[in-house]
Image (cartoon, rainbow, N blue to C red):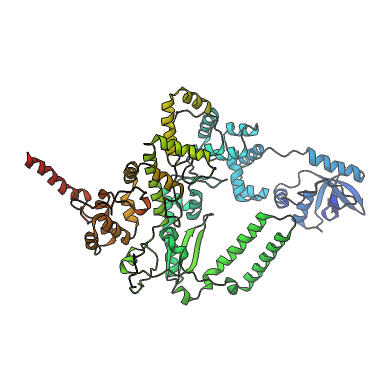
Amino acid sequence: MDIKVPLKMLKFGHEDGEGINARVAGRDDGIAALAANLNANGQIENLVVKDAGDGFFSVANGNRRLAAFRMMYGEGADQPIGCTLHQVDNDKAFEYSLTTAITAEQLHPVDQYEAFARLEEHGKTEEEIAQQYGMAHKQVRQALALGRLSPMIRNAWRKGEIKAEVAQAFTLAADHQSQDKLFKKLVKENDLDRHSIRAELGVKPNEDIGVLVNFVGMDAYRARGGHVAEDLFKEQHIVSDDVLLKAMVGERLAKECDRLVVDHGWQWAAVEADLPKSWRSWPTTRVDVEKFFTPEEEVRAKELAKRADAIEKAEDYDWEAEQAIGAQIDALKASVMPRAFSDKQKAKLGCVVAVDGDGNLEVQYGINRPPAASASEAAARSPTAGEPPEIKSPAKKTGKAAEPDLSQALIQRLSVQLTIAAETALIQDPDLAISVLLAKFASNMNTDGIQASVNGLGASKLDLLGAKKFADNLELARALKPAARVELLVLVAGAALNFQRFSSNDDNLLKGNPGLICDAIKPEAMNSALRGAFDSKDYFSSVPKALSLAAIKEALGADIARQQEKNKTPEIAAFAIANVPPTGWLPESLRIKGYDGPPVKKATGKLASARPKKPAKAAAKKPAKKVAKKPAKKK
């Protein structure tokens, strides 16, 4: 019998005697979303109830809807609720609850996402869908993206032929045609997984593109002419111009440096990537931020500490919850940190800015940057906002002066050049190449310097047999002569190398396995390959003036280095680029055990122009003409 019951006269089934509600877990889950839906669409289905006496009714089926109604109208409201009354005892009412819970099947995810897409087609906005179904805006965008997948992808998902993560990866493809084409290709190659899809679509797994896009803002990047294929699930977006993206990151960080100096009174501020590796050892002034909490912040801090303590002591310890609370505590302290320093302290100290792993601005305050030891070192420093002009008074010479540090960005580029050179030289020695490969396969999984699953820097250029499927490659490999197989294995060994270093704290590129491999290669081959891979223009344009002068001194002599000291940094760099590489000079980071360049060898011949305005080509023509005349006279 269908009846209308005032909300205040309805009781939860689990509160009635022995309890007639079979659901225990998840009773309170998603009530807000359910309330939003009921508010938008009204009550569609009656609650199933039994008479509980004294005018009250107990709910056998619909207890979560009852909770939603109470959220909407209040527990003591007279709002009439549609119910279906069954005159049954507690046992039968419990069976009704259990039967409904077990037999009520949830929509398949594909059906749910298609339904959301249909709502959009009928004019519902993302905001309206989010409000109506109690979903976060990002959840709605994810659901709509999945609902818009091509019918081919959706059917494969519905049939269980692909997993949810595979379907999610296809949302990065531009349209249905692109999705279907890629799906057919990867099915044919038996390579249909999330990683392969993303690789085909251009996702670079080793770059934090998503982090950088989050930092500059997707709208801002698009406004500058960039295009983004947004990854709603892993945030590994695809961008059309990563050079533009990184330039925008640099611009924002530079503006932040200016703001810290001009608006907040810090003596200096610098981008972390521009600093030498030694900056982390610079003195840092510590402050107790808790002393600077406002009353409201103090209450908030105590509340968070209490929650963290409760999580730690709970029997069912929740690591993720503890991490979330810890992040909130750190965020609170970080927001107070800038005002914990006095104006007097700021006038003497500086800040270092960077992008954190979530795409947010990270600022480290209170860094005491050591003053430059000389005017030349001060001029050689990386650009910063508010750089202090202070210079240390000359100290007594007690030996070799410490050289300026290389930036972590330059260290990474040098390590790539070292890898390329080692690959070029290694494949000239088949015995060593195969030995390196065998040593890797015989060692543990994490072997520094060589990635024998062929994920090394040369992997993208490697095309061994031409097929995609293992079965086809096996057939092709078996058809090769033994010598040809050895030649291909040598190429694999070279492509498996990866000596990259990403930390400025690790500027010894030849330590560990990379050093062992490079030193084992024949020196003449390795030195030649290193000089071919070394990017002198990048190096001398990136290092401080002092390092350019040191290179000139080693390669061309102390007299020439002294002549260059009076010039500006760009002029010295241009001179070094034109004149140092022909001598065979290499930076210390690339000097193997068998290094045969300066200062071992002395430079010979005329020098190229030191002035950047005159191209190096013009300077190089003079000695070329003289060489041409001499043989003519001898004739």
**Residue 323 x, y percent position in the rendering:** 63, 57
**Residue 189 x, y percent position in the rendering:** 52, 29
**Residue 388 image-quadrant placement:** bottom left
**Residue 376 image-quadrant placement:** bottom left
Please tell me whether residue 300 is drawn above or below residue 187 in the rendered image.
Answer: below
Pick the front one: 248 or 557: 557
**Residue 420 image-quadrant placement:** top left
Please tell me whether residue 49 is drawn above or below residue 574 in the rendered image.
Answer: above
Pick the front one: 280 or 154: 280
Extreme residue toward the top, this view: 479
Pick the front one: 484 or 143: 484
Task: Look at the image and tell me in which quarter the N terminus lies.
Answer: top right
Residue at image position (43%, 60%) is: 277
Q: Is residue 123 visible?
A: no
**Residue 465 x, y percent position in the rendering:** 45, 28
In-image side of 380 versus 455 (left or right): left
Please tell me whether residue 366 is drawn above or below residue 47 in the rendered image.
Answer: below
